[in-house]
């Protein structure tokens, strides 16, 4: 049976028009993507070019100074690193545990619903609100001071919803049959969770963690609210000491500054030489974020390779 | 044996180094962003001179925000671009915080216009017409301020409402602190104001002298008609001889008495008094005469605490008036 030629022509025309639409949509999509990428690239290149003269090893090993050419970001990047360490150590275990509980263990009733709604809402709360909360709770009520630990805890609270939501999404994407197979072989719920659910959802969880950490590293508002300092020309005490027990947690109590605050301070200086410093520090902050993302993508790729079902 | 002794010594040093010294040898400074450049410079040099044995941190919370911390006893030294207010004196008294008041430099609040603008001088009355709350939405052209000025739109740029600069300028121009029209481009970041005025021939803005000094090629400073009726451009000489009024203002540090009893705060403040003048000059402020720093040192030595301003800001105070007043404390 063959169709009359005019109908074939009509079908062909239809297909052609659909293909054109397809092409138009793809073009729009690529344009959107290109626009976003070019914006970021232009910003990054602009900062890198403006701050080019400042990319010297001393820039990383010098403390801030009133003389632009001698000023460095040592206290800022060390501060950022320490704060992020605290944030990761608090947000990851709490966030993943909360996600696993909500997805695997939580009974389905209204209390769980309330918790769920709250977590989703928390993800949309402006960061300054977390800063105010931290100022009242951590700094004054708990007396933790304006220290690395306060900043770390604040940012941990800020990214907790992101980690929880990502964990839940990742767990949900695991096929039910994996659980059934595990139970079928006599594994307990905890064994199933520990040996199958969490490892299989790791790529997704990692993505969530890195998204959260990338947001946290660039946060300024809550850190300023809890009282980060602008001029600080010394490092927190080293975490490793030469006396038993060889580990010191004094750095948690130390005053600090972070990269975004250093950048902010330099952009508001009267001397234009500081603006080059700010641009250089900005480029470095972007590079830090991008390398964190790259690490996450690499880890996800490694982990995914081992998962086959 | 020798190795053991060394180890013990290192252990003792490590213990002291990590715990006790860290908590104690730290000077906490916070407050105004206007005073910040001087304090930062002093802190940098002070730490170098002490080889890191004493440490200083400097924050920027604004004069008002800084005083809140200072009067809770959280900081040792407060940077202030205006004298302590009556409310803040009360807070400090309630918390039992006693303090020394030390003027460290003068700043010339500078009114700037675009280099192409025909405006050369302004009187305080004209500034008032421009900036008072009643001008909001009404005074929108230069020739409404003065018929001799061009028939061009008036574009205003000014400090954000949280800064000491805003408080001083509004009081100097309109007679009442914080009384300003609201329909102008406000920014806490003075570079935004610099750029705004640089781009618009009809713009006018105000900020601390340091921002003008770094941007002299892009901006023009307006001469201000002083109390003697003479138009004076901002300069170090004009601040020193008192002719740049009422826009010259003293800036201060406040040192808490309990902090001053600690060796590191005492050393820091002494270092400040010895090097503040040079540092002020370096960051484009007007240093006070040597007599003033000696007077402050004397107050510290004799334990003369409190403020000479009685909780009120003083517009157009001259260096010699300030000195005379400090001497009476």
Image (cartoon, helix red, strand yellow):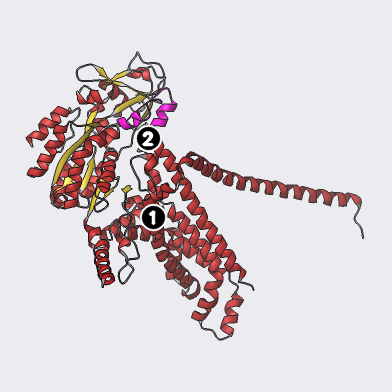
**Which circle marks residue A304 in the picture?**
none
Q: Nearer the viewer, residue A208 or B256?
A: B256
Residue A300 location (% of width, % of height): 56, 64
Q: Residue at x 37, y 19 (%)?
A: B142
In the picture of the structure, the residue carrying the numbered disc 2 is A271
Specify the segment rendered in magenta: B193-217
- In reply to whether residue A33 is colored magenta, the answer given is no
Q: Farthest bottom residue?
A: A186
Nearer-the-camera pick, B186 or A229: A229
Q: Position of residue B205 (x, y in %)?
A: 35, 28
Check the residue under mark 2 and report the chain it is in: A
Label 2: few (<14), some or many (≥20) within 10 Å?
A: many
Q: Secondary structure at mark 2?
A: loop
Q: Is the C-beta separation of discs 2 and 1 under 8 Å?
A: no
Compare residues A146 and B12 and report the one nearer the observer: B12
Q: Quadrant of the C terminus of chain B?
A: top left
Residue at the spot of label 1: A78
In the image, residue B154 above or below residue A79 = above
Same subunit under labels 2 and 1?
yes
In the displayed structure, would residue B273 be above or below residue B97? above
Q: Is residue A43 left or right of residue A238?
A: right
Q: Is residue B229 above or below residue B38?
A: above
Q: Quadrant of residue A183?
A: bottom right
* Chain holding disc 1: A
Q: Quadrant of the N terminus of chain B?
A: bottom left
Report how many numbered discs are placed on residues in the image: 2
| N-term-proximal mark, 2 vs 1 | 1
Left or right of A35 on screen, residue A235:
left
Would residue B159 appear left or right of B95 to someone viewing this image? Answer: right
Res. B307 in view: no
């Amino acid at each position: 049976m063959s169709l009359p030629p005019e109908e074939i022509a009509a079908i062909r025309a239809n297909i052609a028009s659909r293909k054109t639409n397809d092409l138009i949509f793809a073009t729009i999509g690529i344009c959107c993507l290109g626009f976003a990428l070019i914006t970021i690239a232009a910003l990054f290149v602009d900062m890198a070019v403006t701050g080019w003269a400042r990319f010297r090893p001393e820039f990383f090993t010098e403390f801030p100074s009133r003389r632009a050419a001698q000023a460095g970001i040592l206290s800022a990047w060390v501060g950022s690193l320490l704060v992020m360490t605290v944030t990761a150590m608090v947000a990851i275990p709490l966030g993943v545990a909360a996600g696993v509980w909500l997805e695997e263990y939580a009974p389905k009733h209204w209390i769980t619903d309330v918790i769920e709604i709250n977590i989703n809402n928390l993800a949309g709360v402006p960061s300054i609100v977390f800063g105010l909360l931290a100022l009242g709770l951590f700094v004054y009520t708990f007396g933790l001071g304006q220290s690395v630990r306060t900043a770390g805890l604040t940012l941990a609270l800020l990214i907790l919803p992101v980690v929880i939501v990502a964990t839940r999404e990742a767990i949900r994407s695991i096929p039910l049959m994996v659980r059934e197979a595990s139970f079928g072989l006599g594994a307990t719920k905890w064994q199933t969770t520990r040996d199958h659910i969490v490892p299989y959802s790791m790529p997704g969880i990692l993505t969530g963690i890195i998204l959260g950490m990338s947001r946290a590293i660039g946060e300024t508002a809550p850190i300023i609210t809890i009282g980060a300092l602008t001029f600080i020309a010394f490092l927190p005490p080293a975490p490793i000491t030469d006396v038993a027990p060889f580990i010191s947690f004094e750095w948690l109590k130390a005053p600090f500054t972070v990269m975004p605050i250093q950048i902010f301070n330099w952009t508001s200086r009267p001397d234009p030489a500081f603006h080059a410093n700010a641009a250089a520090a900005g480029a470095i902050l972007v590079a830090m974020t991008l390398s964190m993302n790259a690490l996450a993508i690499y880890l996800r790729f490694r982990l995914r390779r081992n998962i086959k079902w | 044996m020798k190795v053991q002794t060394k180890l013990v010594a290192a252990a003792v040093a490590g213990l002291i180094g990590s715990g006790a010294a860290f908590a104690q040898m730290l000077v906490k400074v916070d407050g105004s962003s206007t005073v910040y450049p001087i304090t930062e410079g002093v802190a940098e040099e002070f730490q170098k001179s002490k080889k890191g044995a004493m440490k200083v941190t400097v924050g920027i919370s604004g004069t008002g925000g800084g005083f809140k911390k200072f009067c809770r006893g959280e900081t040792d030294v407060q940077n202030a671009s205006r004298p302590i207010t009556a409310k803040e004196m009360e807070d400090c008294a309630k918390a039992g915080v006693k303090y020394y008041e030390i003027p460290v430099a003068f700043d010339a609040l500078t009114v700037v216009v675009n280099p192409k603008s025909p405006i050369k001088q302004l009187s305080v009355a004209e500034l008032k017409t421009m900036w008072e709350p009643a001008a909001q939405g009404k005074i929108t052209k230069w020739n409404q301020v003065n018929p001799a000025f061009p028939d061009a739109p008036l574009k205003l740029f000014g400090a954000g409402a949280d800064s000491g600069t805003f408080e001083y300028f509004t009081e100097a121009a309109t007679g009442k602190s914080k009384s300003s029209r609201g329909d102008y481009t406000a920014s806490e970041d003075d570079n935004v104001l610099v750029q705004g005025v640089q781009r618009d021939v009809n713009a006018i803005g105000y900020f601390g002298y340091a921002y003008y000094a770094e941007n002299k090629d892009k901006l023009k400073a307006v001469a201000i008609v002083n109390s003697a009726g003479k138009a004076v451009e901002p300069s170090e000489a004009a601040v020193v001889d008192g002719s740049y009024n009422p826009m010259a203002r003293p800036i201060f540090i406040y040192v808490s008495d309990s902090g001053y009893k600690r060796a590191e705060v005492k050393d820091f403040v002494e270092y400040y008094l010895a090097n503040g003048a040079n540092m002020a000059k370096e960051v484009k402020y007007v240093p006070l005469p040597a007599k003033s720093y000696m007077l402050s040192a004397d107050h510290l030595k004799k334990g003369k605490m409190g403020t000479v301003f009685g909780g009120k800001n003083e517009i157009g105070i001259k260096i010699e008036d300030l000195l005379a007043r400090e001497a009476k404390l």
